[in-house]
Amino acid sequence: MVKLYNEVLGAEVDLPDAPARIVSFSPAATETVFRIGLGDAVVGVSAFCARPHEASLKRRVGSYNTVSKEVLDGIRPDLILTVTGYQRDFALAMSKRYPVYPLELPVSVAGIVDFVVKVGLVVGLPDEARELASSMIRQLSRIPPAKGVRTYVEIDLGGPTSFGAHSYITDAIRLLGCSSIFETERCEWLRPDLNLVLEGDPDAVVYEAKMYSKFVEGDLRKLIESRGWKEMRAVANGNLFLTPGPLDFLAHHGPSFITEVMPWLSQRLIGAGERLGR
């Protein structure tokens, strides 16, 4: 058993040397645990833990911030992983009965790399986590930048949601040589004024539907028409992009954000710049 101080809890957490019964309520932490080779130790996940595919086959024990005490008592976890932000109060409540370690939400792409290393330290596999982090940095260095594309990003998180300066999504767009129309807002996320988005006339629009929904390109076109955005520069130039698949994509800050999301985003923004003659 080791003791590791946690800033959120303001206390040391007793952690097993080699956790054998991990419950993760963080999709990013879940993906990381699997990627560093400890997936067999995961005995429970949230309903939103779907990466890698093997994680979705694990027992679903709750949602982002809900779980039954009886379920956890039956599972007997020796480590519970959560994040800060929307799970902070949830983590604090569970920590009164179980070994919980909340991990800080990243505000930058570098923070995603740091997140991976921290997970490795918590579960006792620092070398494996650093190897994964190093591979992420190498891949990041190979992603080609775009040229000054002004971008509007929207994710359906129970309503239209965009992102300000304190978001790893905004940071990723900047690292790719582009800008986000709300990048000067000093917040992580915001509910955008859709009329202001239209007035801002971005070069590209990236849209992510609600997780697990059956939202397709035709639905996005209807949404754009209903908002009166058909003449927006992004739409008129064919720079309207729907993220692939039914899972969280931009909204997921696990290792795949760097290995999958950023290459995808780079390709779209490079193409957007070319269509704009840049």
Image (cartoon, grey):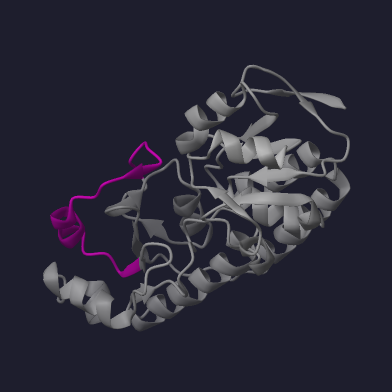
Residue 133 placement, left or right of 45? right
> Could you say which is closer to the camera, residue 105 or residue 182?
105
Q: Is residue 198 visible?
A: yes
Image spot of residue 98 (x, y percent) = 67, 28
Quadrant the C terminus occupies: bottom left
Q: Is residue 191 magenta?
A: yes
Residue 16 placement, left or right of 269? right
Q: Residue at x 37, y 62 (%)?
A: 210
Q: Start and end of the magenta stretch?
A: 184-206
Residue 81 placement, left or right of 202? right
Image spot of residue 181 (x, y percent) = 31, 54
Q: Is residue 232 visible?
A: no
Image spot of residue 251 (x, y percent) = 47, 56
> Could you say which is closer to the camera, residue 261 or residue 65?
65
Query: In which quarter of the view is residue 82 placed?
Result: top right
Query: In which quarter of the view is residue 81 placed?
Result: top right
Please determine whether, in this image, residue 250 is positioned above or below residue 277: above
> Could you say which is closer to the camera, residue 163 or residue 1?
1
Q: Is residue 106 magenta?
A: no
Image spot of residue 63 (x, y percent) = 49, 47
Q: Residue at x 72, y 38 (%)?
A: 77
Q: Residue at x 47, y 53 (%)?
A: 169
Residue 136 placement, left or right of 273? right
